[in-house]
Image: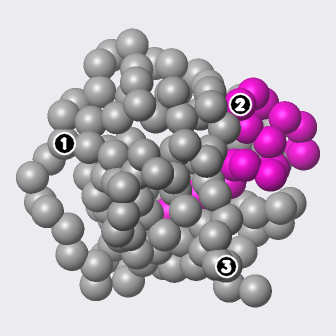
Amino acid sequence: MIKSNTTPGPKKTQLQRRLRKLGNPVRMWSLLHGLPSPPYTRRNAIIIETIGRKSGQRYRIPVGFLEESGKLIVISEDGPHASWVKNAQPKEGQLRVFLHGRWRQARLQLGTGDPDSYLRRMNRVHAAFVHTESSAPSVIEIMPES
């Protein structure tokens, strides 16, 4: 099991929650159908799917990433406090990712390193969004199965 600090992160504003509720389904639809949804394309975004640790429901979220040494590097805006990270932790980091047009099993682990060093190599619009929305950004490594 992956351990993390249990202190909750700052709450999102009502506007932030509403914008995500509207924008994320549009971005996911686009990514699933191979269409760009700026700033995301299939080359710089994945869809992460987790199962709710309390509800048992399936949750999906689009995120920007970098591919490095076979790992997908994601900067979580809320670090280990992000719901998708907390949902994967009790399942030993297991989740699914929609990567390059297909679903794959994957494993998450909390990464090390400076989130800004990765954000500098990501899409500028995505990096600016992460900076604006972040409460405690941190590096998350996702290892997809072949």
Please determine whether, in this image, residue 37 is positioned above or below residue 142: above
Residue drawn at point x = 35 percent, y = 68 percent: 112
Q: How many marks?
A: 3
Between marks 3 and 1 in the image, the one whose residue lies nearer the viewer: 3
Q: Are marks 3 and 1 in contact (CB under 8 Å)?
A: no
Tag 1 secondary structure: loop
Please tell me whether the stretch drawn in magenta is mainly helix, strand or loop: loop
- What's the residue type where badge 2 is placed? Pro
- Can residue 47 be found in the magenta stretch? yes
Residue 125 at x, y percent in the picture: 62, 27
Residue 83 visible at all:
no
The C terminus appears in which quarter of the rendering?
bottom right
Q: Which residue is mark 1?
A: 9
> In which quadrant of the rendered view does residue 6 lie?
bottom left
Q: Which residue is mark 3?
A: 70
109 left or right, relative to 121? left
Residue 55 at x, y percent in the picture: 36, 58
30 left or right, relative to 21? right
How crowded is the residue under tag 2: few (<14 C-alpha within 10 Å), some, or many (20+)?
some
Please determine whether, in this image, residue 102 is positioned above or below residue 37: below
